[in-house]
Image (tube, rainbow, N blue to C red):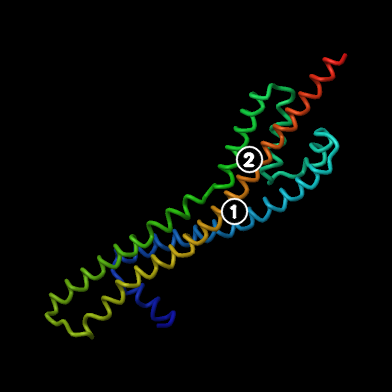
Amino acid sequence: MNGDNVLSLILNAGPVVKLVMLILLFFSVYSWAIIIYKHRFFSKVEKDSAKFYRIFTQGRDWESINKGTASISMSPIANVFRAAFSAGKRSSEDMRRSLKRAEIVEAVRLEKYLTFLATTGSTTPFIGLFGTVWGIMNSFHGIGKIGSASLAVVAPGIAEALIATAAGLVAAIPAVIAYNYFLSRANRNIIMMEDFSQELLEQISEHDDDEARQTRSV
């Protein structure tokens, strides 16, 4: 079946099937827009995180690190660091809460729009199936009016109906694959961010212990 035949089937379908096809087209186009956006988003996030961590490990103090990474905005670990730096000198528990709030904000940003991909993957096959069932019902209704059930009469209507199921799968399959792929990348960045937060807390704790020892020695 070539593209002209598929287009002809869609144009000859009933109004309900056409509406279903429009809904599926919306899901498919929006899903692909999200896929392209998230691919670029995660590429930038991971590039910025690598750049930030390189500066962080080579930095002498938090002040110089903060200045040196001011232009890095997409990295979750950079944003967590800035949250810790902005908090100033606080107790370990207050700092832990500040970091946890920053982690939540960054996790939401990493997972943004993924829910739509999951919704597309789970619902569009059923939307397509609804269009198919409706189209087949109309086909059998037409058969009843004509009074003939020959293949020549039945086949066009059934083919028009089945195109909705095919469209549902075309929308769902890329969305499911992309959802699982981007969710794994988001989780990987979240784990790295949580590990980095723990590293910051350990540095703060060591710094506080050093200051306490120096105070006692004086």
Viewed as shown, does residue 133 lie left or right of 54?
left
**Which residue is pictured at 28% across the width and 80% down the height?**
156
Q: Amino acid at mark 1?
A: Arg
| Residue 3 in the image: above or below residue 184 | below
Q: Residue at x 60, y 45 (%)?
A: 190
Q: Secondary structure at mark 2?
A: helix
Report helix, strand or loop for mark 1. helix
Q: State the image quarter where residue 91 is shown.
A: top right
Percent across and percent down for residue 96 are 64, 29
| Residue drawn at (37%, 65%) of the image | 21
Residue placed under numbered mark 1 in the picture: 185
Is residue 170 shown left or right of residue 48? left
Asked which quadrant contains residue 16, the reply is bottom left
Q: Give the number of the disc on residue 157.
A: none
Residue name at image x 71 percent, y 48 percent = 49
Q: Could you say where residue 194 lies in the image, as x and y percent from the top left?
A: 63, 40
* Marks 1 & 2, CB-CB < 8 Å contact: no
Tag nearer the camera, 1 or 2? 2
Q: Residues within 10 Å of mark 2 (few under 14, many from 20)?
A: some
Q: Quadrant of the N terminus?
A: bottom left
Residue at mark 2: 194
